[in-house]
Image (tube, coloured by chain):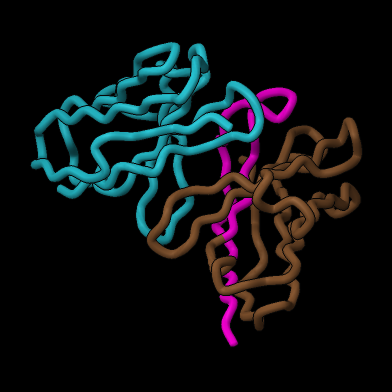
Amino acid sequence: DIQMTQSPSSLSASVGDGVTITCQASQDISHYLNWYHQKPGRAPKLLIYDSSILMTGVPSRFNGSGSGTLFTFTISSLQPEDFGTYYCQHHDNLPLTFGQGTRLDI
Amino acid sequence: QVQLIQSGPEVKKPGASVKVSCKVSGNTLTEFSIHWVRQAPGKGLEWMGFFDREDAEGTYAHQFQGRVTLTEDPSSDTAFLELTSLRSEDTALYFCARLVGDLGLGYFDFWGQGSPVSVSS
């Protein structure tokens, strides 16, 4: 199984700040990497798929990049609604696996 | 607009079974793949599997093999997850999600609201 490791596990930031989260895969997954945002008690929301493609309707302050084993997710200017937990998920092969999550406090 | 509507909370005793449903509206079930993901309290997301219509059987994550059964009823556009031999560690929020992709690989663009399952003696 492919292991996905996110860092940091948590971070605190202020409105207007930029933040970066990384996701490392235990083996080459090409660009098959998705990013989700989840608020407590709610279903995850897809933000970015295939490493860098912004889902329709997602603000342009969100950005993803990377390929192979190392991926980066950035928020350029934090908004209050961006708090919550962010997860990466690979889809190179089965089983699908998620990173452990990065909790963002604002 | 696609919606995935899940069944309500369940409280079960250890050793029992639970069956959770996920009804698709705004589209038909057979037009895409439904996967199941669970989340224990305070923990991350754990992929469980999906019903592969090509093989007419479920494809499951290793840790659930032998305890989980995924089925579908196209006549009611509803997918089902059944988990047996429940233990306290199965206490979680169970989500169904629509996969955009092929061969079980892709991204999840629509999710159900989650079905809470609590296992306690």
Residue B2 appears in view:
yes
Q: State the residue lying farthest toward the bottom.
A: B121
Chain coloured brown in this rendering: B
Magenta stretch, overall SS: strand
Q: Residue at x 71, y 23 (%)?
A: B102
Question: Which residues make up the magenta segment?
Answer: B94-121
Residue A106 appears at what percent x and percent y? 15, 48
Residue B72 appears at what percent x and percent y? 84, 50
Residue B34 appears at what percent x and percent y? 71, 42
- Tell me: A6 left or right of B86: left
Chain coloured cyan in this rendering: A
On-image quarter of the C terminus of chain B: bottom right
- Tell me: B55 left or right of A103: right
- Whether A68 is among the magenta residues is no
Q: Residue at x 40, y 16 (%)?
A: A52
Quarter holding residue B90: bottom right
Q: Residue at x 42, y 61 (%)?
A: A41
Q: Residue at x 48, y 14 (%)?
A: A31
Above or below, comparing residue A104 to residue B104 in the picture? below
Residue A45 appears at what percent x and percent y? 45, 41
